[in-house]
Amino acid sequence: MKNPKLKLFFLLFLLGFSSIYSQYTEVINSNKPGFSESPYSVGTGVYQFESNLFLRNTSIEPTFSIPQSLGFDLLFRTGFLIERLELNTQISYQRDKVAFKNIFTSDYSSAEFREFTIGAKYLFFQQEYDDKSKEVRSWKKRMSFDTNRLIPSIAIYVGINTDFINDIYKTGNMSPKLGLLFQQNLSTDFNLVSNFFYDKIGTKFFEYSYIITGTYTLSNQWSAFFENQTVFQKHQNNTNLGTGLAYLYSKDLQVNTSARFLLEGKAQGFYGGLGISYRINRHQDSYKEINESGNDLEDTPIKRYNKKENGFFKRLFGIFTKNNSKKLLESEEKGIIKSLSNYDYLKTSY
């Protein structure tokens, strides 16, 4: 585009179009405990930290292997400029047991960064779904499956692998990482996330990988996941099958745990993880829902969701609140009656 006005118009159009669909959610939306990444951004003004303490253990194989790792993962995410764009940084620090097996077996320990990747993702397509709950005329239509749910939301990921890592993981220089991220919300309780990556591009250690994750909401606080990841390398393929649970402690805090079966070339083993995801929420909507008089709407989908999230505890503590309010009201009524009686007595005395 040689015309600068046309460039400016295209940029403003992109920013305006992107701000129509807010990626922000009232409760934290974490990728953990899975390895896959949702195409959705956390939203502008949100600073999210997703951590994971893990232990990995596999069999020792000839001639060189890393059979054991104890480490810590940290993913930092934040929305940037527009709702659909997210910047993130993935860091992994671990203590490895490095083994050599030939005639004899020996090993040593090494502690350093395994991964330090800076990236960004942009959601360029967001699928919309019909609200079946509003269908009151036909039970069949209300309960029918929305075929639009088969069409995923799509994001593109672009990252750079830095070389500030342990020598045993170095590839020689910095390298790019590309990915396509998909998510299908097949129902209100079940969604499917699929990732496809081309990593360490331009190096001798380039690799392709895919991740497929199914997440099922068990309740307002609990959710479970099942996941398969396979990495295709030049000399071997690595596969892991994982499952786990996540618990929503508050709207900004999630705790999770996971377990995995590992198959790395000829080596087999397990992986266990325990993590916490937390966000600092400074998000401000670019628009507000108002009524015809220009006042904020009291009843919106987000507010109804919040009421549902807090429904049980609100009702539980509401019982005591109502009882206390009732007792206070009765006490005030007795005080007023007593005051009136004293007033009548004084009036008749005079």
Image: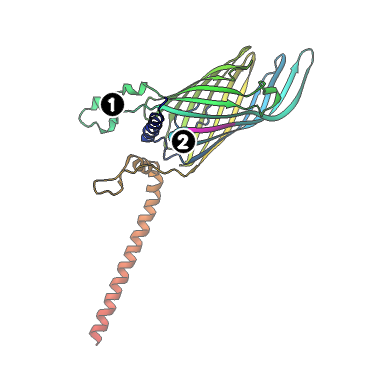
- The x, y position of residue 7, in whole percent, is 41, 29
Residue 69 visible? The answer is: yes
Judged by depth in the image, the label closer to the viewer, 2 or 1, is 2
Image position of 8 (left or right of 77): left
- The x, y position of residue 271, in whole percent, is 60, 25
Given the image, on which type of amino acid does mark 2 rest?
Val
Which element is circle 1 on?
Answer: helix
* Viewer-proximal residue among 71 and 8: 8
Look at the image and tell me in which quarter the C terminus lies: bottom left
Image position of 144 (left or right of 205): left
- The x, y position of residue 304, in whole percent, is 34, 42
Q: Is residue 31 above or below residue 196?
A: below
Q: Residue at the location (77% across, 13% down)?
A: 102
Q: Residue at the location (79% across, 12% down)?
A: 103
Label 1 sits on residue: 143
Task: State the mark number for residue 127.
Answer: none
